[in-house]
């Protein structure tokens, strides 16, 4: 996810210089926002602390800050995309809640969120 965020942030210069955004950038932005929201929500269900989630969200906000003009030109509301990802995270967690691999998924998700939060 971190790489996706960096890739679309690198594309900000396209919006600033009034050049067309590269093909697929809208999908990359949306995918990154959805993924971040979903990860956040699954981590919450898996028991991540409020502080860890707060730092993870702050990291997402910092990574996306400055791209508002580009997002608007592409018709992307990054906060709405993040919230949609959270809804998808609820659905995903509900689908694995009773699954035998839930603990593995939770462990991996918590490790990812903690590693991203630590980069703050």
Image (cartoon, grey):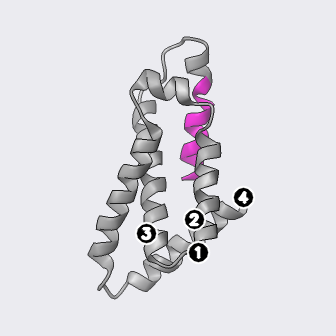
Horizontal side of 110 relative to 27 (left or right) equals: right
Dots 3, 2 in contact, CB < 8 A:
no
- Secondary structure mainly formed by the magenta segment: helix
Q: Is mark 1 on a helix, strand or loop?
A: loop
In the image, which disc is placed on residue 119? 4
Horizontal side of 35 relative to 17 (left or right) equals: left
Mark 1, residue position: 49
Query: In 3D space, how far apart are the residues under numbered discs 1 and 3 (Cα atoms)?
Result: 12 Å
The percent position of residue 53, horizontal first and vertical second, equals 57, 65
Question: Which of pointers 4 and 1 indicates the residue nearer the eye?
Answer: 1
Magenta residue span: 1-12
- Which residue extends farthest top? 18
Of the numbered discs 3 and 2, the one sitting upstream in the chain is 3
Query: In 3D space, how far apart are the residues under numbered discs 4 and 2 (Cα atoms)?
Result: 13 Å
Picture quadrant of residue 91: bottom left
Of the numbered discs 3 and 4, the one sitting upstream in the chain is 3
Mark 3, residue position: 42
Picture quadrant of residue 31: top left
Q: What element carries label 3?
A: helix
What's the residue at 39%, 82% (across, down)?
A: 102
Of the numbered discs 1 and 3, the one sitting upstream in the chain is 3
The percent position of residue 65, horizontal first and vertical second, equals 62, 37
Q: Is mark 4 on a helix, strand or loop?
A: loop
Query: In 3D space, how far apart are the residues under numbered discs 4 and 1 (Cα atoms)?
Result: 16 Å
Mark 2, residue position: 53
Horizontal side of 69 relative to 10 (left or right) equals: left
Dots 4, 1 in contact, CB < 8 A:
no
**In magenta stretch: residue 36:** no
């Amino acid at each position: 996810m971190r790489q996706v965020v960096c890739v679309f942030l690198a594309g900000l210069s396209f919006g600033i210089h009034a050049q067309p955004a590269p093909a697929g950038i809208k999908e990359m932005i949306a995918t990154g926002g959805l993924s971040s929201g979903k990860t956040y929500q699954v981590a919450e269900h898996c028991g991540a602390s409020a502080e860890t989630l707060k730092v993870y969200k702050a990291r997402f906000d910092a990574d996306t800050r400055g791209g508002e003009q580009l997002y608007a030109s592409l018709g992307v509301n990054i906060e709405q995309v993040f919230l949609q990802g959270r809804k998808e995270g609820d659905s995903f967690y509900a689908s694995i809640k009773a699954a035998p691999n839930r603990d593995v998924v939770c462990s991996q998700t918590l490790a990812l969120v903690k590693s991203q939060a630590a980069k703050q």
